């Protein structure tokens, strides 16, 4: 299946009053960065620099990609012109939720024989598609919720659709994972306990549940086709309430993940420690090349050993402010979507987006 790589729109959150959300074991890393400055102008400047670094590294890798854009008033003034002058290609998706345009990983998940389109995309954008590619409207089109490579996928025990937000008890409890869309597509599925986050402003924080595995890990393929999960060394899991610690400690969480992965033929790697928040949320493309943040030696040593140092590309500056202020890893910011469906979506965008 031919795919198009999308880099998220350059829309930055630089308000220090916005609640922070991060994996529990990485909270100290997030707080170090959050405490560096409260000046929105400085935050914006550093977010912009990191974005440009990701853009430049994609170009260095020889990856063909487009930047998803939406309404210009939402984007940083001047950055689109600067990117154009650097040779960027854009695709406008003005009728789509801006949140997905910023994080296109959550637009679609590409499997070996089909594409899953997020249920956050209105069905009207999908119903008329009759291209040769198999397209399924699925929750697991929200690509942050799934780690997949070849014919294997990892998902969490529960997920929390935004459509249930008005029903507080159901939204907190979540829905039990239903991997039917995946198994019917021939994917071998492993189900792992949900990571637990810390959420809040400053030290005024509570625990929260998460289902986006790309905040705590990445699934990559080595030079021989073997599969490997690189996992947050301080992951805790199984949400127990906003004021109660997770049910599963670091040791128990790692054991649960290892057991699930062993059954799927996935080898788990746990870095000794992390120095940059979200650094395990790297991305590997179809050609097995990896894009990850610079400055995270404990992770890069593992990745280089698996795929070869010649296949690992690092950003020119460490990606620190995006995880902290944008709540996004590199994996969140870069997505893949079936190319023919994207062409159809673009053609439908103006009509359906304005209706």
Image (cartoon, rainbow, N blue to C red):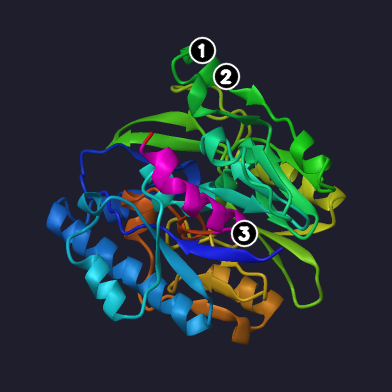
Q: Earlier in the sequence, mark 2 or mark 3?
A: 2
Q: Which residue is mark 2?
A: 173
Asked whether 220 or 34 is in front, the reply is 220
Which numbered marker is on residue 340? 3
Q: Is residue 216 above or below residue 300?
A: above
The answer to whether mark 2 and mark 3 are in CB contact below 8 A is no
The answer to whether mark 2 and mark 1 are in CB contact below 8 A is yes
- Image spot of residue 2 (x, y percent): 67, 66
Dot 3 lies on which element? helix
Mark 2 burial class by Cα count in 10 Å: few <14, some 14-19, many 20+: some
Mark 1 burial class by Cα count in 10 Å: few <14, some 14-19, many 20+: few
Residue drawn at the location 59% of the way across and 41% of the way down: 126
Q: Which residues are magenta?
A: 336-354
Classify residue 316 by image quadrant.
bottom left
Q: Is residue 181 above or below residue 165?
A: below
Classify residue 220 by image quadrant.
bottom right
């Amino acid at each position: 299946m031919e795919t198009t790589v999308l880099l998220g729109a350059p829309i930055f959150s630089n308000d220090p009053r916005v609640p922070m959300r991060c994996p529990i074991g990485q909270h100290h890393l997030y707080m170090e960065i959050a405490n560096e400055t409260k000046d929105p102008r400085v935050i914006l400047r550093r977010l912009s620099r990191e974005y440009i670094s990701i853009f430049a590294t994609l170009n260095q890798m020889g990856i063909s990609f487009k930047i998803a854009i939406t309404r210009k008033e939402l984007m940083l003034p001047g950055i689109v012109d600067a990117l154009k002058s650097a040779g960027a290609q854009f695709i406008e998706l003005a009728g789509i939720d801006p949140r997905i345009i910023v994080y296109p990983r959550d637009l679609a998940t590409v499997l070996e024989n089909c594409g899953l389109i997020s249920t956050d995309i209105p069905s009207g954008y999908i119903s008329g598609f009759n291209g040769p590619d198999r397209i399924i409207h699925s929750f697991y089109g929200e690509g942050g919720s799934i780690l997949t490579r070849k014919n294997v996928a990892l998902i969490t025990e529960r997920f929390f659709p935004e459509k249930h937000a008005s029903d507080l008890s159901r939204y907190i409890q979540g829905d039990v994972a239903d991997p039917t869309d995946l198994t019917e597509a021939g994917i071998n599925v492993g189900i792992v306990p949900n990571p637990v986050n810390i959420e809040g402003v400053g030290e005024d924080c509570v625990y929260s549940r998460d289902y986006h595995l790309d905040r705590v890990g990445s699934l990559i393929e080595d030079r021989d086709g073997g599969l490997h999960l690189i996992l947050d060394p301080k992951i805790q899991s199984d949400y127990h309430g906003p004021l109660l610690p997770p049910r599963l400690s670091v040791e128990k969480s790692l054991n649960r993940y290892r057991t699930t992965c062993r059954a799927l033929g996935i080898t788990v790697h746990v870095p000794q420690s992390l120095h940059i928040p979200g650094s395990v949320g790297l991305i590997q493309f179809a050609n097995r090349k990896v894009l990850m943040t610079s400055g995270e030696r404990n992770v890069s040593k593992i990745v280089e050993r698996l795929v070869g140092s010649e296949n690992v590309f690092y950003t020119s500056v460490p990606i620190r402010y995006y995880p902290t202020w944008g709540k996004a890893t590199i994996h969140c910011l870069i997505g893949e979507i079936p190319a023919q469906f994207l062409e159809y979506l673009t053609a439908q965008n103006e009509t359906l987006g304005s209706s």
